[in-house]
Image (cartoon, rainbow, N blue to C red):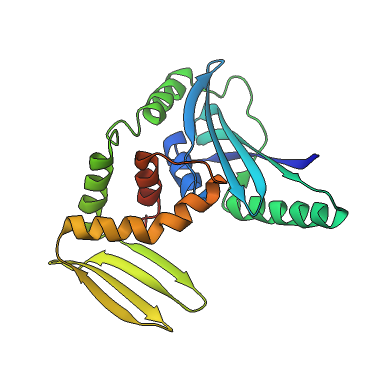
Amino acid sequence: MKFGSRREIRFQDIRSPREVKLSLERDTKTLFEVVLENNKLCMRAKSTLVGAEYDFQVVFEAALPAGNFYLLTMNVTWVDPTSGNFEYYSKTSNSWFELWTRELTPAEPPGPCEDSAQRYQLLCDDALNADQHLESVTAVQAAIIAAMKRGTAFRTSHKEGGTHLAWNGNRFVRTDYGDNPSVQQFADETEFLKALRQFYHWEVTSRFGGTQLSEIDMWRLILRRMDE
């Protein structure tokens, strides 16, 4: 038997739909599909966390003079044979929702005359075409390498330490700190990319409940792990 809950937030944000999508992909660690539906831009994603299935939808409602108006909905379902599990998933799903929406500002729906149809269409086109340059694994890898050589890096942290993956001007370097400090340099881009994929494999695949990810989606999710 399936149990579940639903949470939603209406918010106003100066960021474009493309920027909101990228932010949510970083936070939820899953990719959002962008589609036009009933003349509205919709962004959807699915993720699995500790046995619960999360279904997200963001609707771009209006392009406003001082920002944009969105509706974010999160549906979570789980198999719950006991009341103890029901309480656990209810609390944890609420905690995840609060974490993922912590920087969003709740707002009331705008009036019908506030929306700019022309600006709305331009922002829709931008979001729909945002990933066109990432049409292959090679293209995503090239984007990662280029960003790192401009100074962007990968960083992780946990209670035992963390890892920093960066370009030092001559080589790609992995620096581990904390309980097991170490430094590893990579001979070339091919060696580094192989190590990068291995490093993020579990984190990227753990959110999909056993669903097989395509290689390009794997690399797109790795790209989202980069520092902003």
Looking at the image, the residue that sits furthest to the right is 83
Query: In the picture provided, is 209 more to the left or to the right than 177?
Result: right
Image quadrant of residue 128?
top left
Q: Residue at x 29, y 33 (%)?
A: 135
Q: Quadrant of the C terminus?
A: bottom left
Looking at the image, the residue that sits furthest to the top is 38
Query: Depth check: 24 or 48 in front?
Result: 48
User: x, y percentage for residue 40?
Assistant: 54, 21
Image quadrant of residue 125?
top left
Q: Quadrant of the N terminus?
A: top right
Residue 152 seen in the current view: no
**Number of numbered tags placed on the structure image:** 0
Query: Depth check: 156 or 47 in front?
Result: 47
User: x, y percentage for residue 107?
Assistant: 65, 39
Query: In the picture provided, is 154 more to the left or to the right than 83?
Result: left
Residue 81 seen in the current view: yes
Residue 183 versus residue 83 in the image, above or below? below
Image quadrant of residue 165?
bottom left
Q: Residue at x 35, y 76 (%)?
A: 176
Query: Depth check: 53 or 101 in front?
Result: 53
Q: Residue at x 51, y 45 (%)?
A: 24
Query: Depth check: 66 or 153 in front?
Result: 153
Q: Residue at x 44, y 41 (%)?
A: 213
User: x, y percentage for residue 207?
Assistant: 54, 49
User: x, y percentage for residue 201?
Assistant: 41, 55
